[in-house]
Image (tube, rainbow, N blue to C red):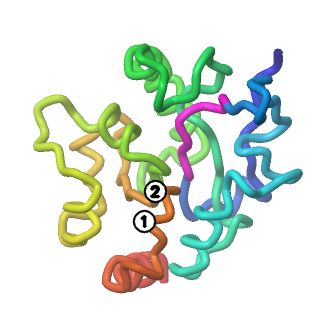
Amino acid sequence: MKEPKPFCSNTDNIKAFVLGCDPTAFDKTGNRLEFEYVFDLGNDERYFKGVIDNLEQISLSIEKVYVQNLVTDYQKEETSKNKNWHQTAQEYIAIRKQEFDNLDPSGTTPVFLTSEVLYKVLINPDEKKYKASQLYNSPELLPIPAISNLLGRPLIPLYRHWNYNLKKWPQYSKLFKLYFD
């Protein structure tokens, strides 16, 4: 089983990285779905629709981001049910950091996190941890500085969950629209 490829329209024009957890998904009968590209981009955008909507809210498009999963291998269970996910993710952080550093040696291109579980695994162990609602209600905490996380670049929560659609968070949306102007 081949891992999905990262999705990027143009590696010379990356404004942000978008990081998912892992490619694991199942159909209604429990069969694992396999994708050519992360989030099944280029085929079926339902897994990424919330992120695309949020990118549009801050005047970015799918053509200006590089999309990858932290864990690139398929897992036995979806992230939320995988008791070993945090440990597995630790093994991929250095690999993902190197991948992003190869594409952006300056380390300044930010990483959008599509899930709170990514925030929890990437934040430095000695840093104060915030809940999703705290981060979205306190945009002054963002972006999470490069020195505060294991990827060594700015992190921005852009969670896929419907509750974090940026239409519901106008101050947050405004901040990052300005950030990318």
Residue at 74%, 66% in the rendered image: 63
Dot 2 crowding, Cα within 10 Å, few <14, some 14–19, many 20+: many
In the image, the segment drawn in magenta is 18-24
Q: Amino acid at mark 1?
A: Asn
- Mark 2 vs mark 1: give the one in front: 1
Of all residues shown, which one is farthest toward the front? 29
Q: Is residue 147 above or below residue 133?
A: above
Q: Percent position (x, y) of residue 95?
A: 53, 24
Residue, disc 2: 159
**Vertical position of residue 20 compared to residue 90: above or below:** below
32 or 90: nearer the eye?
32
Residue at 53% from the left image edge and 36% from the top image edge: 21
Q: Is residue 87 above or below residue 112?
A: above
Asked if residue 141 is among those painted magenta in the image, a careful observer would answer no
Q: What's the mark number on residue 69?
A: none
Q: Residues within 10 Å of mark 1 (few under 14, many from 20)?
A: few
Q: Position of residue 48 (x, y in %)?
A: 67, 56
Contact? badges 2 and 1 (CB < 8 Å): yes
Q: Residue at x 42, y 66 (%)?
A: 164
Mark carried by residue 163: 1
Residue type beneath disc 2: Tyr
**Residue at position x 48%, y 25% from top?**
81
Q: Is residue 23 magenta?
A: yes
